[in-house]
Amino acid sequence: MEKFMKLAFIEARKGKNTWTNPQVGAVIVKDNQVLGQGHHETFGQNHAEINALNSLSDIAQAKGSTLYVTLEPCSHFGKTPPCVQKIVEVGIKKVVIGQIDPNPIVSGRGVEYLRDHGVEVEILELSSDLNSAYNFFYKNKRPLVTLKYAMTLDGKINRKKGTRSMISNQLAFDDSQKLREQNQVILIGENTLKVDDPKLTVRTKDLMFPPIRAVMVRDINTIALNGRLFQASGPIWIFSGTQSQQEFPQNVRILVNDWTPQRVIDYLGKQGLESVLVEGGSHIQADFFEQELVDHIIIYLANKIFGQGLPAIWGKQLPTMNFSDLTVEQLGSNLKITTWRLD
């Protein structure tokens, strides 16, 4: 059993365009032999169970088989029909589930349907980092917030006020691009927009569902429309304290309010977005810490000393927050340090 579920998890991680849907893998087994396997490839398209069935040379092979699936099969009509109906229809005898789906429109209902229709169900409730943002979202009713920054050995993220300083090496840069790819929103503050003039894109590949690039600003009318942010396609959301007096490109959504990190996160959660990557700078990072909205921290530590400069977190009296033991990965001359907030 263990080897087949492991194979299902390997299959699940192949899904790169699932957007707000979870990554799911499925394996069909009979007489201790793998007959078919599949994963959820693209948001709005076939789920893993259907792709595994479609991989069979003959659908009749499914009769009497066991289906290993990393997440509870869906039981509702969404963008696709319920997977549980197809499982029953083709005569699968047993379904082994890695995790119950935390989404309330599914949770437990898929298992109930299968059992009511004579399918044996075994639930393993395995612990995995697969779909960590998806699981967090439905448990906590808000997006998972990851705070990422690069700093020197003396804790600086910039050498001189108003100018951008290069800190990380190429390996750290490439890794940070993978991190952007894994999040649905990339968020920065006004100072980072003006000083760094970033694109905030994932430069290593073209994505079917690129992250929303979000900026928190006090006054939208101070933003330069010739900035690099507006030179790339894809959705841009600007959380502004003022109404715009200039015309922005069509891919820009302007949201006016007295925004705080909590209000921004609440808004993103209401849009169904599950993961937010905060990329600085020091004041907005302090704001997120102050409101206890940091769930995951990733630091790229460079082998440099700046002396005078801007610290990573600045300007707030912060509450005590406990984090897990550090995970450290060598990236050439840099280190990647990761930790998670403890409940």
Image: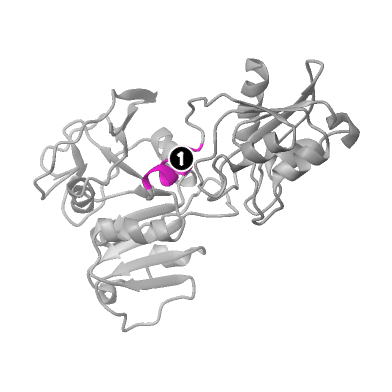
Determine the residue positioned at 25% across, 30% down. Answer: 323
Q: Which residue is mark 1?
A: 135
Q: Work out whether 328 lies above or below 208.
A: above
Q: Work out whether 291 lies above or below 306.
A: below
The magenta segment is 131-140
Determine the residue positioned at 79% across, 31% down. Answer: 92
Is residue 300 in view?
A: yes
Horizontally, residue 31 falls left or right of residue 324, namely right
Q: Work out whether 193 lies above or below 183.
A: below
Q: Amino acid at mark 1?
A: Asn
Residue 148 point in image, percent of width and height: 32, 42
**Where is the C terminus found, in terms of image quarters?**
top left
Q: Secondary structure at mark 1?
A: helix
Q: Report if residue 85 lies within the magenta region.
A: no
Depth check, front residue: 230 or 118: 118
Horizontally, residue 95 falls left or right of residue 300, namely right
Residue 25 point in image, percent of width and height: 65, 34
Determine the residue positioned at 25% across, 65% down. Answer: 259
Majority secondary structure in the magenta region: helix
Based on the displayed image, in which of its 4 quarters is residue 89 positioned? top right
Determine the residue positioned at 41% across, 60% down. Answer: 270
Based on the displayed image, in which of its 4 quarters is residue 57 positioned? top right
**Where is the N terminus found, in terms of image quarters?**
top right
Scheme of image coloration: one colour
Depth check, front residue: 67 or 143: 67
Could you classify mark 1 by the number of other residues whose Cα lies within 10 Å: few (under 14), some (14-19), or many (20 or more)?
A: some
Q: Work out whether 215 lies above or below 223.
A: above
Residue 286 point in image, percent of width and height: 18, 48
Is residue 197 in view?
A: no
Task: Specify the farthest residue to the front.
Answer: 116
